[in-house]
Image (spheres, coloured by chain):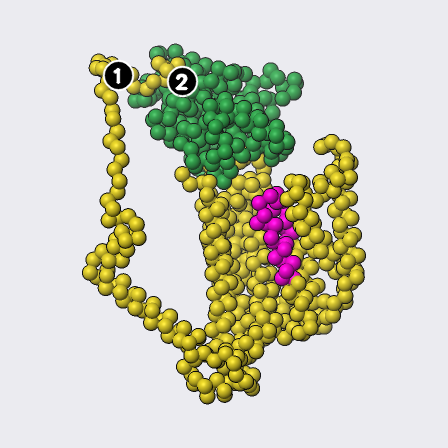
Amino acid sequence: MDEVLSRDSAAVEQLPAEIFKPKPARAAPPSTLGVQGWVRQNMFSSIPNALVTVLGIWIVYAFFDTILTWAVGNAVWEAENRRQCLDLVGRSGACWPGVIAWIPNLIYGLYPKDQVWRINLAGVILLLWALPLWLPRVQSKVQIGLSLVLLFPLLASYLFLGGEKGVIWSALIALGLAGFLWTLLTAATETISGLSFGRYAVAAIGFGGDNDPARRNGQIAALLALYVVALIAVQAMSLSFVATRAWGGLFLTLVISGIGIAFSLPAGIVLALGRRSRMPLISMLSTTFIELFRSVPLITILFTFNTMLPLFLPVGVEVNQLLRAIVAVCLFSSAYMAEVIRGGLQAIPRGQYEAASAMGLGFWQSTGLVIMPQALKIMIPTIVGNFIGLFKDTTLVSIVGLFDLLSMSRAVGEDTRWLGLFLEPFFFITMIYFVVCFTMSQYSLNLEQRLSAGERR
Amino acid sequence: MTDAVRGEPPVEMIGVNKWFGAFHVLKDIDLRVREGERIVVCGPSGSGKSTMIRCINQLERHQEGTIRVHGRAYGRDLRENDAIRREIGMVFQSFNLFPHLSVLDNCTFALTWVKHLPKKEAEDRAMEMLTRVRIPEQAGKYPLQLSGGQQQRVAIARALCAQPKIMLFDEPTSSLDPEMINEVLDAMVELAESGMTMIVVTHEMGFARKVADRVIFMDQGEIVEEAPPAQFFDAPRFDRTRLFLSQVL
C-alpha cells in the first residue's frame, strides 16, 4: 500500500541520513517583558509618543477632576429646594437633593406608590426566571429561555396593568405563572437529580421503563396539574387597574426596550430568512418591509403610528398609546435586526448547507441546527449593539407623550421646588444609561468568548 | 433497503444533462455503478466531474435525464429525495464539518436529528466510526482544533455514521497539506477494502491505480473514457486521456 501511495519515488541514490537537531528556544529579551517592558514599548517608545502619552494623561486627569469636583467635591446632599443649593455653592457643585427626592418617579414614573411592589415583584420574577440559565447543572436551558421570552410577558402584563381579567386573559396569565413555576421546579429537580420537572414527577410516582407511553402521559399530567395550580392562583389574585398613562421612568424604558428586544430577534430572523427565500413573493414582501422601515427615521414611524393610525381605524376603536409606541419600536427594530442576521447568514459558507442537506436534513433543520447557531454567534457583537441602540432610542417615545426615563428627568426641573434643575437629573440618568449599556456590551464580549472558546486553534 | 430493490444498481445515471445558466456542464452522462464497485473520476478542472457526483445526491439538480439510487429515481417529491440521499454519504473537499459542534456531536448529528437514535446508541456508533478512521481520542475537540487530515477523517467518520450504502468523495485530499494526504487515503483504502460502493473524484492517481475497479475520465462535461485502471493508465484509447495523464503522472 505504501509503495503505491507514496507520491514521488524519484530514483535518487540514498546516502545515510544526517540527523536533524532543532535549535532550543531562547527566552525573549527582558526589556520586552512585564509591565515595565509594556509601558516602555507602548507609551514611551519615542519622543512624540511620550509627549502624546503625557498629554493624554493630563486630559483624562483634567476631565475627571472637573467632573468629580462638581459631582462630589462641591456637591450639596441636603437641601429643601434649589434656592438653598445655589446659596450654598452656587453652580460650582451639584444639587443632589432634587434628584434624590425624584428618584422614585425617575424609576417608576407616576405609578401609584402603594402599587410599586408589583413592578418590583415582576423584576424579581424576571431575575429568578433567568437565573437557571446560568446554573451549571440545569439542562433544559433552551426551554427555560424560550419560556422566559414567551411567557414572562403574559405574567408581567397583568402585574403591571392589573384590573379586570376575562377568561382568556386569565388563562394566558396562568400560562405565564405556570411557566415560571415550571422553570423553578425544573431548575430544582435538575440540580438535584438531572431530570426535568415532568420526568422527575413521573419518576417520583414510579412509572415503568423509558419508552413506556404511560410515562409520557404522566409527564403531561404533571404539567397539566401545574397549570391548574397556576390557574387557581391567578383566580385568587386581584390587582387594581393602573392605566398605562401612569407608567413612566426607567420602568417604562425597560418595558418598551425589553419588548422591542424580545420581539426584534425572532422577527428579524424570520424576515432575514424571508428575504433570502427562493419564493419570490415572500422574498419581495420581506425586502419591502425591511427597506421601508429602515429608510424612515424611528421618530417618523412613532409619529405615524401615534397620530395617523387612529385615522385608519374605525371610529370608537382606540389603540392604547403605549401599545402604539411599542408596535412602532418593534417593527423598526426588527427591520434592523433582519439585516444584521442576514449579514450573519451570508458569512456561513455554502458548504455548511451542503453538508447538512447531504445528510438528509430538510431546510428548517439545517437552518435551525447548523446555520442559525453559527450566524447568530458571529453576529453577537452587532446584535447586542442593536439592543443597546434600541434601549437608547426609546428616549424618542417622549415625543409622543410617554414619560420615559428622559422625559421624567426633564420633569424634575419643572417642579417648583427644583425649578431649573436640569443638569443633575441628566447626569443621573446618563449614569443609568451607561451602566445598563456597558453591562450589555460587557456581557456580549463575555458571551462571545465563552461560545468560541472551543473553536480557536 | 428492502429486498425488492436489492439487485438494482446502487447508482444509475441515464442521459443526464445539466446547465449552469446557458453553460452546458453535463452532456448525456450515462453511468451504471455496480454493488461494491469503486469508481475513480478524474479530469481537468471544469470538466464537470464534481457536478456529476453532486448530482448523485442532488446537491445539484439535473435538468434532463434520470438518476436512480437503488432503483429509486429523484423527482419532484422533496421528502422522497431526502430519503434517497440518506442512503448516500458524502465527503467534501473543504471538509464542511460543523465548527460549532464537537467532533463527537458532528458524528452523532445525523443520527440524532435524522434517524432519531437515542443518545447513547448514537455516541457508541460515532465512537466506533471514529475508531475506524483512527481518531477516537479527538472526540471531545472542536473541528478547528484539528489538522486538515484529521478533519477530513472526522468527515469520513461522520458520513459513515449514517450507515450509507454509497460513499461519494469530492476531491477529498485536494485542500490538504502534502504530509496529511496519506492518512486520509489510508482511511479510504480501508473503507474500499470493506466493500463499500465508492465514487471518488480525485487527482490521486496512485489511489486510483490501487483501489479503483474502474477509472472514468471526463472532459468538457462528457465521459470521455472509462476503463479498469491497468488499461486506463497503460493503454488509454483517446488522445485527450493521454494528454491528461502525461500532465498529472
Whether residue B221 is visible: no
Residue position for label 1: A10
Rendered view: A243 above or below A88 = above
Estimate the x, y position of residue B210 in percent, counting from the top left.
40, 14
Image quarter hosting the N terminus of chain A? top left
Q: Is residue B108 visible?
A: yes
Q: Position of residue A16 (x, y in %)?
A: 22, 15
**Residue picked out by circle 2:** B208
| Vertical placement of residue A24 versus B233, above or below | below
> Residue A119, image x and y in percent?
65, 66
A418 drawn magenta: no
Is A448 left or right of B205, judged from the image as shown? right
> Is B230 rendered above or below residue A251?
above
Res A68 quadrant in image:
bottom left
Left or right: residue A177 versus residue B246 is right
Local SS, label 1: loop
Please, what is the dominant secondary structure of the magenta stretch?
helix
Q: Colour of chain B?
A: green
The one nearer the camera, A204 or A229, is: A204
Crowd around label 1: few <14 · some 14–19 · many ≥20 (10 Å): few
Pointer 2 chain: B
SS under mark 2: helix
- Residue A190 location in percent, x, y? 65, 43
Question: Which chain: yellow?
Answer: A
Report which quarter residue A240 is drawn in. Answer: bottom right
- Residues drawn in magenta: A122-149
**Which is closer to the viewer, label 2 or label 1?**
1
Disc 2 residue type (three-letter): Ala
| Residue depicted at x 63% and y 54% | A129
